[in-house]
């Protein structure tokens, strides 16, 4: 198989999914697009693809070979499944995929948020999926992108590098080799604990949205989310959230990257503190704030990023007071118990495992046999 013969299924037709599908297609790969709501992709199907504006200022057209709401049809014969949806949909996607997955297919969560690959693999096991499938997760989404219309997308910036790990870690290199012709920016992470603990969206997205709640509601998001939404005080809250994340990771035996280190790695942006590093990042210029508080930065990142970090903190004896405050604030604003709805230790398949057993599982895919 030549590199260009490799076929991709992009699951999700939101900001990221449309951009990734168009980007792959305009570069000559065979691409299919799945979305559970057919009305949402009707214009793309009728048009035959997606118009894409890239950071170089040029516009392209990405032709798609199939646009569908039928997962069985979408998965037939594809090599790589790029899941680009809010993480609270990962469990459903795993259930939809389970009967149709075939040996040698690769599934990549873009990104997994906190524990995405762990949950996806756990659901496949619950659904008795026996296909030899490699499941991996990216630490963050490769693009800063937005949907610009029914069949239009824009990429503001492509990150320099994005760590990726498979579950188990022994399959990471296999996944990278499959993805290399399309995205050389993916680099190996030691395992999915690293990609999950290095979930920078957990730090940026909920707090920036919640701490700017009044501004979002009064302006309907008419301001730049990062460059204007991050003030020195907001940046200090982000720094405190980041310390808690790094501490939870350390309890798992993981040295997590700090947000300052990540900004330099992903965007080549530096500063003497977090406020300066964010303001110095040209990749954030032009990105508007959410128009409403009913946004994935809250309904995805709180239950699928912050909540599992808090559960892991409790499991490991680490205090996460600032994270708990953000979860409580989001729950009050949305009238939703996000802690109850969030990704739990059980849903990640880690219940009753020691730190050593968790480490062994993410490396080898093997759990201890108990009660037999």
Image (cartoon, grey):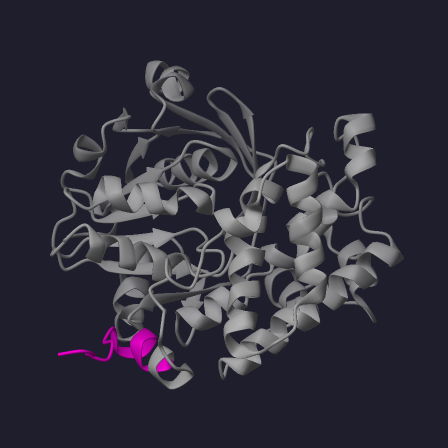
The location of residue 81, given as percent across then percent down, is 29, 46
Q: Is residue 109 visible?
A: yes
Q: Is residue 367 left or right of residue 231?
A: left
106 is within the stretch colored magenta: no
Q: Is residue 179 left or right of residue 267?
A: left
The location of residue 305, given as percent across then percent down, is 54, 56
The location of residue 95, given as percent across then percent down, is 25, 43
371 is within the stretch colored magenta: yes
Q: Is residue 223 left or right of residue 151?
A: right
User: Of residues 25 and 116, which is closer to you in this image?
Assistant: 116
Asked where in the image residue 250 lies, by quadrant, the reply is bottom right
Q: Is residue 3 above or below residue 258?
A: above
User: Of residues 63 and 364, which is closer to you in this image?
Assistant: 364
Q: Is residue 1 left or right of residue 86?
A: left
Asked where in the image residue 223 lies, by quadrant, the reply is top right
User: Of residues 48 and 334, which is closer to you in this image?
Assistant: 334
The location of residue 229, given as percent across then percent down, is 80, 45
Q: Is residue 216 above or below residue 271?
A: above
Quadrant in the picture for the C terminus: bottom left
The residue positioned farthest toward the right in the image shown:
232
Which range is magenta?
359-372
Residue drawn 61% across and 76% down?
A: 318
Q: Is residue 15 above or below residue 117?
A: above
Residue drawn 77% across and 33% down?
A: 216
Residue drawn 28% across and 71% down?
A: 168
Q: Is residue 67 above or below residue 297?
A: above
Q: Is residue 255 visible?
A: no
């Amino acid at each position: 198989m030549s590199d260009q013969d490799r076929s991709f299924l992009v699951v999700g037709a939101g900001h990221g999914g449309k951009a990734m599908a168009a980007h792959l297609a305009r570069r000559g790969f065979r691409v299919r697009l799945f979305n559970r709501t057919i009305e949402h992709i009707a214009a793309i199907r009728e048009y035959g693809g997606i118009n894409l504006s890239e950071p170089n200022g040029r516009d392209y057209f990405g032709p798609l070979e199939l646009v569908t709401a039928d997962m069985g049809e979408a998965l037939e014969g594809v090599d790589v499944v790029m899941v680009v949806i809010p993480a609270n949909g990962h469990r459903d996607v795993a259930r939809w995929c389970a009967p149709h997955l075939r040996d040698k297919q690769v599934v990549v969560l873009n990104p997994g948020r906190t524990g995405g690959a762990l949950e996806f693999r756990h659901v496949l096991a619950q659904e008795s999926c026996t296909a030899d499938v490699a499941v991996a997760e990216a630490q963050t989404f490769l693009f800063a992108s937005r949907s610009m219309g029914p069949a239009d997308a824009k990429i503001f910036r492509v990150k320099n590098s994005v760590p990726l790990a498979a579950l188990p870690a022994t399959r990471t290199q296999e996944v990278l080799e499959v993805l290399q012709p399309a995205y050389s920016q993916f680099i190996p992470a030691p395992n999915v604990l690293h990609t999950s603990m290095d979930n920078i969206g957990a730090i940026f997205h909920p707090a920036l949205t919640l701490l700017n709640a009044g501004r979002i509601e009064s302006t309907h998001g008419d301001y730049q989310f990062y460059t204007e939404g991050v003030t020195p005080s907001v940046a200090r809250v982000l720094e405190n959230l980041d310390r808690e994340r790094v501490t939870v990771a350390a309890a798992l035996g993981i040295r997590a990257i700090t947000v300052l280190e990540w900004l330099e790695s992903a965007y080549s942006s530096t500063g003497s503190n977090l406020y300066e590093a964010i303001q110095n990042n040209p990749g954030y210029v032009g990105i508007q704030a959410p128009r409403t508080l009913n946004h994935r930065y809250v309904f995805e990142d709180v239950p699928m990023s912050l909540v599992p970090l808090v559960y892991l903190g409790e499991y490991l004896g680490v205090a996460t007071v600032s994270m708990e405050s953000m979860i409580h604030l989001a729950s009050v604003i949305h009238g939703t118990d996000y802690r109850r709805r969030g990704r739990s230790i059980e849903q990640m398949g880690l219940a009753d495992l020691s730190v050593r057993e968790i480490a062994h599982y993410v490396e080898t895919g093997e759990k201890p046999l108990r009660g037999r």
